[in-house]
Image (spheres, helix red, strand yellow):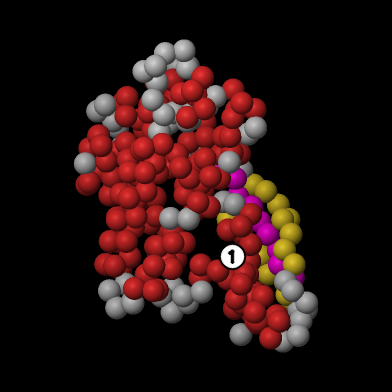
Amino acid sequence: MTLDDDLGGFEARIGYTFTRRELLRRALTHKSYSHEAKTDDVRHNETFEFLGDSVLGFIVGDLLFRQFPDLDEGALSKMKAYLVSATSLAGKARHYGMGDVILLGIGEEKTGGRKKDSLLANLFEAMIAAIYLDGGIEPVRRVIEQSFASDLKAIDEDDLLFHDYKTALQEVAQGRGWPLPEYRVIDEVGPDHDKTFIVEVKFGSKSARGEGTSKKEAQQQAARHALRDAK
């Protein structure tokens, strides 16, 4: 199977076909690969990350503004920060199998670069830039809306602690004189590029579970469920 075959499958997963596939190749080229290349025309994706971060922030901000027109700036900023966090973007990159198609240098490959949250989050931003440069604002908006649909649907505007349930749970435990919550991973489900973690938290005499595409996200969801039980 050639790289173009892999990219064709990737395009199908994200729901967008590039007119200029060289933009996608650059978005998927890590600087470690570019530095090791024997030709000078292999360019890496760092400036694409910069542009993608701006495009992503604008569109996610617009989606939140339209969905929650009565919320203040602080609440919207908290929501946006959570949605475009490195953990969140890395999870979306894994969902699309981006770790399988990135071009890495030998050293980065050996240190597990395909699974690093920071690298995958940057990769997602670079992909957003490539779609924007190739097709403009409407196609990239559709991809972003598709990527964040479940996240936006899950947001509870009356629960603005949604982005940091762990801190909220810790504060409740301290207020009641209980030991701090303890978290442990009890299961991992799915392939490496689309893994789901199941975490259990012990809180006082109770326990709760949560799931997520990263351990941190699963811990947050477990804390969220524990908070609801504690009310």
Where 146 sits versus 76, above or below?
above
Whether residue 220 can be seen here:
yes
Residue at the top extreme of this rendering: 38
* Amino acid on which disc 1 is placed: Gln
Estimate the x, y position of residue 191 in percent, counting from the top left. 60, 39
Which image quarter: residue 75?
bottom left
- SS at circle 1: helix
* Residue closest to the eye, 44 or 120: 44
Q: Left of 89 or right of it: where is 200?
A: right
38 to the left or right of 170: left
Q: Look at the image and say whether residue 197 sits in the magenta stretch.
A: yes
Name the residue located 39 percent from the left edge and 55 percent from the top edge.
148
Question: Which residue is under mark 1?
Answer: 221
**Magenta region, residue range:** 194-202
> Overall secondary structure of the magenta stretch?
strand
Q: Residues within 10 Å of mark 1 (few under 14, many from 20)?
A: many
